[in-house]
Image (tube, coloured by chain):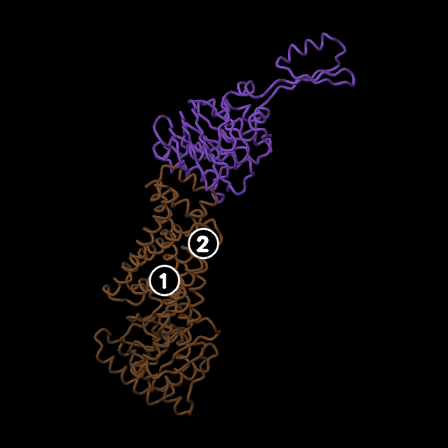
């Protein structure tokens, strides 16, 4: 075992010290994953933030916010009829966030002094967390800009004051002094509202920029709700919920694609390692050492396996941390990664075992594998492929590793459906190691 | 220690080793002297078990063939090519081989070897940055990492500068002083003459003769040449007894200079093969 570990450590060191191998194994797949993620709609292409807008409410304030959003230079707004259509647009990567002005806005307006505020919802692509804060701030600003119009609406305000008065009457938490003070405040508010209505002013001259949630909350009397927690506007930001069988973002698809290239890089690096040992003469030393061909194969296979696990962990980790992907089934994903690493180590050992020259190994390692990676979903996702290519893809080990990874990564596939890719990968790995074993044993003569 | 019996090895129509037999005793420094392509490296490869002979037997330490890993453990090989990982440091290379051989206390062993080959100051530099001589010394250290009883050095000074060559020769002497059995192939007769207890002359895959250097010279070197100068006149006399000849020349008077040329391994090789070692 010590000899196998020594061989694996040595081969990993050699891999990590070869700039070309490091690039093709670790850097290139990541670049591809990010590139394809953006190509397939990951955003970031324009300076404006794409918003999918749904106006469910027929309140005047909703129409005003929608109009302001559409005229705002920071946003490119597309209207959708339904919440589902807007969310689909986010999921497809066409919009950064879906902004929903819900029916419940009217309830929020009616209970402005006693409820939890006028609700607005934003559902954001998890890969655009950075923009979420900006969207929330902008929605608050636009909503506050509409409030003066609300205060100038006499009928709406009368309804509001009536509701507040009723709440004071039924409140068991308020003392008599508090009730008197609150009722007086409401009377003053009614007087203020009627004065601005009488004077024909539709909106008081308040600088919208000077309004903030904090200031508004402090100036409002709300007996039933504590002043510190009250806000007239309630913007809820949520991340796109996962949906069975659908990617949360284009990066869910592009990172398994990148992983294909990472595994191809591993094959390229390790398939030629045996012929390199031969050409640099170190194979003679290895053959003299008290190890067998099986040791050598196991050592090289282990190094390839660990490199494959590293590249998979790196890419999946990056998808989760930087691009908002979430793993539907972590344990199954780990199993899939192990199966993928085993299969591709086996392929690398097969090529290492049967190739006698660097040219052969490079041809097989980088040439044939390149083609297999392409038809296996390395460049275009399989579901985008025409039927003939999709059928051909079954012959590529890359197709199976993509299927094995995507299942527990974002498809949330039932465990029974994940068995087939895992079995195929295990079979490929086993076959590769067996054929490689025959080839590697030859120079050892035992 | 090492016994080769009637070893033959052909590659297609070319016979690389043609019935070589040898007995090398423990602690002996044995030189295989011959020109390039004489069959020295093939003989070494067969001795290590890397090549299987077409016929004949190899026995190491009375334990049997080196194709058995347990037997092979007792030999160390410094091949003619530099067989190291250029992208690893000297220490990493030696540690790797030490772990392959399951050397106990590998760090101490590697430190000692790095000192021995005078590379302890560059232990953490990548081998690819070394000079040819430094690589040669590390190549030799890698052969010693598991402290083998028999060390096979295949042209260990090929392509190195004189300073590095001297260091390598000193190393070989140090190993010999430790009691290692050494098989040393070279086509430099001076090295063989300086280092080896016995020398085997090889050509065209055949062992032409084996013996100590004086024995070989006595058998095949011919007589000494005494050149006597009297003013501008130089007389050459070939004689089996150069001392008596010089005395006789001085007795006859008028001698202004004498030079004695004794036969060497070059002469031995010329006598055995009809051609020069360096041809």
- Rendered view: B196 above or below A31: above
Q: Report the residue that reaches farthest toward the right.
A: B232
Chain ID of residue with mark 1: A
| Quadrant of res B190 | top right
- Rendered view: A54 above or below A197: above
Q: Residue A53: x and y, percent? A: 38, 80
* Front-most of residues B34 and B240: B240
| Quarter containing the N terminus of chain B | top left
Q: Is residue A405 left or right of residue A200?
A: left
Q: Which chain is brown?
A: A
- Rendered view: A304 above or below A169: above
Q: Which mark is residue A398?
A: 1
* Residue at 37% in and 59% down: A317
**Is the residue marked by circle 1 packed among few (<14), some (14-19), or many (20+) residues within 10 Å?**
many
* Residue at 41% in and 89% down: A202
Badge 1 marks a residue whose secondary structure is: helix
Q: Which chain is purple?
A: B
Badge 2 marks a residue whose secondary structure is: helix
| Quarter containing the C terminus of chain B | top right
* Front-most of residues A444 and A334: A444
Residue that badge 2 annotates: A360
| Quadrant of res A240 | bottom left
**Is the residue marked by circle 2 packed among few (<14), some (14-19), or many (20+) residues within 10 Å?**
some
């Amino acid at each position: 075992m010590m000899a196998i570990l020594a061989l694996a450590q040595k081969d990993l060191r050699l891999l990590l010290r070869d700039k070309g191998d490091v690039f093709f194994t670790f850097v290139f797949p990541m670049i591809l994953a990010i590139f394809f993620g953006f190509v397939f709609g990951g955003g970031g292409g324009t300076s404006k933030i794409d918003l999918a807008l749904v106006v469910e409410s027929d309140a005047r304030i909703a129409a005003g916010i929608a109009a302001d959003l559409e005229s705002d230079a920071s946003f490119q707004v597309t209207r959708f009829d339904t919440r589902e259509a807007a969310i689909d647009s986010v999921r497809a990567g066409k919009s950064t966030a879906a902004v929903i002005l819900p029916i419940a806005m009217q309830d929020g307006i009616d209970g402005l002094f006693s409820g939890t505020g006028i609700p607005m919802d934003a559902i954001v692509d998890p890969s655009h967390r950075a923009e979420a804060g900006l969207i929330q701030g902008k929605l608050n600003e636009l909503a506050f800009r509409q409030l003066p119009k609300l205060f100038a609406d006499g009928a709406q305000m009368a309804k509001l004051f009536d509701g507040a008065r009723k709440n004071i009457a039924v409140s068991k938490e308020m003392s008599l002094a508090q009730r008197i003070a609150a009722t007086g405040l409401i009377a003053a508010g009614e007087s203020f509202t009627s004065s601005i209505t009488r004077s024909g002013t539709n909106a008081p001259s308040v600088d919208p920029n000077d309004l903030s949630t904090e200031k508004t909350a402090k100036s409002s009397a709300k007996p039933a709700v504590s002043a510190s927690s009250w806000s007239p506007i309630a913007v809820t930001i949520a991340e796109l919920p996962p949906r069975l069988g659908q990617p949360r973002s284009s990066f869910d698809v592009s990172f398994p694609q990148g992983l294909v290239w990472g595994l191809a890089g591993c094959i390229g690096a390790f398939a030629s390692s045996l012929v390199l040992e031969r050409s640099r003469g170190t194979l003679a030393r290895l053959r003299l050492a008290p190890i067998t061909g099986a040791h050598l194969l196991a050592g090289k296979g282990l190094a390839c396996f660990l490199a494959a696990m590293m590249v998979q962990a790196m890419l999946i980790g990056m998808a989760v941390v930087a691009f908002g992907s979430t793993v539907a089934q972590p344990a199954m994903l780990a199993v899939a990664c192990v199966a993928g690493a085993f299969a591709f180590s086996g392929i690398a050992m097969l090529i290492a075992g049967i190739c006698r020259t660097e040219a052969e190994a490079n041809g097989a390692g980088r040439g044939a594998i390149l083609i297999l990676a392409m038809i296996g979903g390395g460049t275009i996702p399989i579901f985008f492929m025409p039927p003939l290519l999709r059928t051909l893809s079954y012959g590529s080990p890359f197709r199976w590793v993509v299927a094995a990874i995507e299942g527990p990564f974002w498809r949330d596939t039932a465990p029974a459906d994940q068995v087939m890719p895992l079995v195929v990968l295990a079979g490929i790995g086993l076959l590769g190691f067996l054929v490689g074993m025959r080839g590697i044993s030859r120079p050892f003569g035992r | 220690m090492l016994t080769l019996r009637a070893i033959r090895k052909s590659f297609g129509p070319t016979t690389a080793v043609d019935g070589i037999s040898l007995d090398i005793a423990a602690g002996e420094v044995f030189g295989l002297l011959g020109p390039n392509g004489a069959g020295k490296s093939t003989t070494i490869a067969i001795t290590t078990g890397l090549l299987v002979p077409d016929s004949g037997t190899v026995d190491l330490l009375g334990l049997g063939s080196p194709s058995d890993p347990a037997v092979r453990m007792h030999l160390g090989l410094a091949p003619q090519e530099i067989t190291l990982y250029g992208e690893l440091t000297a220490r990493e290379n030696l540690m790797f081989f030490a772990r392959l051989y399951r050397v106990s206390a590998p760090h101490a062993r590697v430190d000692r070897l790095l000192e021995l080959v005078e590379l302890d100051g560059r232990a953490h530099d990548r081998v690819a940055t070394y000079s040819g001589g430094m690589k040669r010394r590390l190549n030799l250290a890698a052969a010693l990492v598991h402290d083998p009883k028999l060390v096979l050095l295949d042209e260990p000074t090929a392509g190195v500068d004189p300073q590095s060559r001297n260091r390598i020769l000193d190393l070989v002497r140090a190993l010999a002083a430790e009691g290692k059995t050494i098989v040393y192939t070279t086509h430099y007769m001076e090295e063989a003459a300086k280092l080896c207890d016995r020398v085997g002359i090889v050509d065209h895959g055949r062992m032409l003769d084996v013996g100590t250097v004086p024995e070989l010279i006595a058998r095949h070197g011919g007589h000494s040449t005494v050149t006597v100068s009297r003013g501008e006149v130089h007389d050459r006399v070939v004689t089996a007894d150069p001392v008596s000849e010089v005395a006789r020349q001085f007795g006859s008077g008028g001698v202004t200079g004498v030079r004695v040329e004794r036969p060497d391994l070059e002469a031995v090789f010329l006598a055995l093969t009809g051609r020069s070692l360096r041809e």
